[in-house]
């Protein structure tokens, strides 16, 4: 059960916070900036209010997850740091002498309390609300783009995952004390998963028993990640690599296995909306959702800035009907023709090729038909038929015995006349220069908040990770703009 009011801290040491934590400390500033009571309001129906043992305060649990997003640490390490880091304890509304939670509580909180909660939209909406109240957002433009996140298991076998984590741990140990090399168990030489698990368990037990340099944070962090893989994720590893992740393409020669986060951001670099999909989804198909989500936060949208992926016919029509200026250069290959929606393939702007529903990219294309104003031409995309023969979803797409698999797109040269004229205007060219800002934001998410690799498997896990990471970067941006 939970109580609406947190327990009043009556600690003789409470004044230590004012002595130790400066006013410009980021966590102190976030505490002052955000009224976290909204977490209680969103989660109270998921707890019993009048029966059972007192639950750990949901606001504190939420703040633990926010700390993970800011500092990119494992559950074990974030809880351990909150044992001695006074800024963490202050942020978590703990008295200096309070005991910390058990790290396993965070897993339960994620799975039981946050399941089926639209946390992504809720947290983005909260930060946009704060930014609007403070007058930080003044523009009426949003910049749209997508960033990719590799799946946690990234098409590796379960054994390869354990190999990778144990290797990182051994490297950390050798850098700290090379003499420990002789004390570690012999590496597994078989391809059997159970043997690799047994080796990892021996490695963990040896280092935990060793003490000394093995207690250093630079060794404890990779050690805890390996322990999580062996203990917490073992069942998932046995079942599959990641059932929701898909192959996506960054260019004709570059692909990834994982997810995409489609983002809308103001010119002030506040993220106003996000849609998380599997890796093969087209960027352009998410535009309308990003605009509607941005409007739902209270943001007034007049101009949308993006790359060629967003200039498809449906988006131009939607923008015209809603009085929006779409600053996105045309690409005639985006037009889908008269196919049923369920039969459409997705266009990858970076590679200039179409990708089938299974995530496989065309190998080449050829253009046919008459040239000239008003004439129709056709681009034909050719797929590797050997891949099609083995595809698990080939039914209805590939005809058994066929020697080729193609996908044709009709190009109508006079279809986007107004947009073509608009993209030649000075206003269009000036606004296009704002697009670089979202690329910098994507880089911040990846390199400062661990968004380059998924922290768990499955689309729901990716949405939770996205919600906390975007909430963190928006809060940091608001604090910077408020200085």
Image: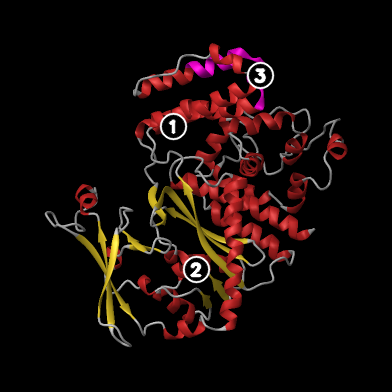
Question: Which residue lies under the disc numbered 3?
Answer: 213
Tell whether label 3 touches label 1 (CB within 8 Å): no
Residue toward you, 185 or 225? 185
Q: Is residue 214 above or below residue 44?
A: above
| Residue 298 falls within the magenta-colored stretch | no
Q: Is residue 284 left or right of residue 271?
A: left
Mark 3 secondary-structure assignment: helix
- What residue lies at 48% left-to-right and 74% top-to-bottom? 329
Mark 1 secondary-structure assignment: helix
Residue toward you, 282 or 417? 417
- Residue 42 seen from this side: no
Question: Which residue lies under the disc numbered 1?
Answer: 161
Residue toward you, 175 or 330? 175
Which disc number belongs to residue 307?
2
Which SS type dominates the magenta stretch? helix
Name the image quarter holding residue 4.
top right
Q: Is residue 45 above or below residue 168?
A: below
Name the image quarter holding residue 49.
top right
Residue 245 at x, y = what percent?
A: 40, 46
Residue 153 at x, y = what percent?
A: 43, 38
- Residue 111 seen from this side: yes
Residue 443 at x, y = what percent?
A: 58, 53
Number of other residues with Cα within 10 Å of mark 2, as a class: few under 14, some 14 to 19, many 20 or more: some
Range of residues picked out in magenta: 202-217
Q: Tell me the CA gap for discs 1 and 3.
A: 25 Å
């Amino acid at each position: 059960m939970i109580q609406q009011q947190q327990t009043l801290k009556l600690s003789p040491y409470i004044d230590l916070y004012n002595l130790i934590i400066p006013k410009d400390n980021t966590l102190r500033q976030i505490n002052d900036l955000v009224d976290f009571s909204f977490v209680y309001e969103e989660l109270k129906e998921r707890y019993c209010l009048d029966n059972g043992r007192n639950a750990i305060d949901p606001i504190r649990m939420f703040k633990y997850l926010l700390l993970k997003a800011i500092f990119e640490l494992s559950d074990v390490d974030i809880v351990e740091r909150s044992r001695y880091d006074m800024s963490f304890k202050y942020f978590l509304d703990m008295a200096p002498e309070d005991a910390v939670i058990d790290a396993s509580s965070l897993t339960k909180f994620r799975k039981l309390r946050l399941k089926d909660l639209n946390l992504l939209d809720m947290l983005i909406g909260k930060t946009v609300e704060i930014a609007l109240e403070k007058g930080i957002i003044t523009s009426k433009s949003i910049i749209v783009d997508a960033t990719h996140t590799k799946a946690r298991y990234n098409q590796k076998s379960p054994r390869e995952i354990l190999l990778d984590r144990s290797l990182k741990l051994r490297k950390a140990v050798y850098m700290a004390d090379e003499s420990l090399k002789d004390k570690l168990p012999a590496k597994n030489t078989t391809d059997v998963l159970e043997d690799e698990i047994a080796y990892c368990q021996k490695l963990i037990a040896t280092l935990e028993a060793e003490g000394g340099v093995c207690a250093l944070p630079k060794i404890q962090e990779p050690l805890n990640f390996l322990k999580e893989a062996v203990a917490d994720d073992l069942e998932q590893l046995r079942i599959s690599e990641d059932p929701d992740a898909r192959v996506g393409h960054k260019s004709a020669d570059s692909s990834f296995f994982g997810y995409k986060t489609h983002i809308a951001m103001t010119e002030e670099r506040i993220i106003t909306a996000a849609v998380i999909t599997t890796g093969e989804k087209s960027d352009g198909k998410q535009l309308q959702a990003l605009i509607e989500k941005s409007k739902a936060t209270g943001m007034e949208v007049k101009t949308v800035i993006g790359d060629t992926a967003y200039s498809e016919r449906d988006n131009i029509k939607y923008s015209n009907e809603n009085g929006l200026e779409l600053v996105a250069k045309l690409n005639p290959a985006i037009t889908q023709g008269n196919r049923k929606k369920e039969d459409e393939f997705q266009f990858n702007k970076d590679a200039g090729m179409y990708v089938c529903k299974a995530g496989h990219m065309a190998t080449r294309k050829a253009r046919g038909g008459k040239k000239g104003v008003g004439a129709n031409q056709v681009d034909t995309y050719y797929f590797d038929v050997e891949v099609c023969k083995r595809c698990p979803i080939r039914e209805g797409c590939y005809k058994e015995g066929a020697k080729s698999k193609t996908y044709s797109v009709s190009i109508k040269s006079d279809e986007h006349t107004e947009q073509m004229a608009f993209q030649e205007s000075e206003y269009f060219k000036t606004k296009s220069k704002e697009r670089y800002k979202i690329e910098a934001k994507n880089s911040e998410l990846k390199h400062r908040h661990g968004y380059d690799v998924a922290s768990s498997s499955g689309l729901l896990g990716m949405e939770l990770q996205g919600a906390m990471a975007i909430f963190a970067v928006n809060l940091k941006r608001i604090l910077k703009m408020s200085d």
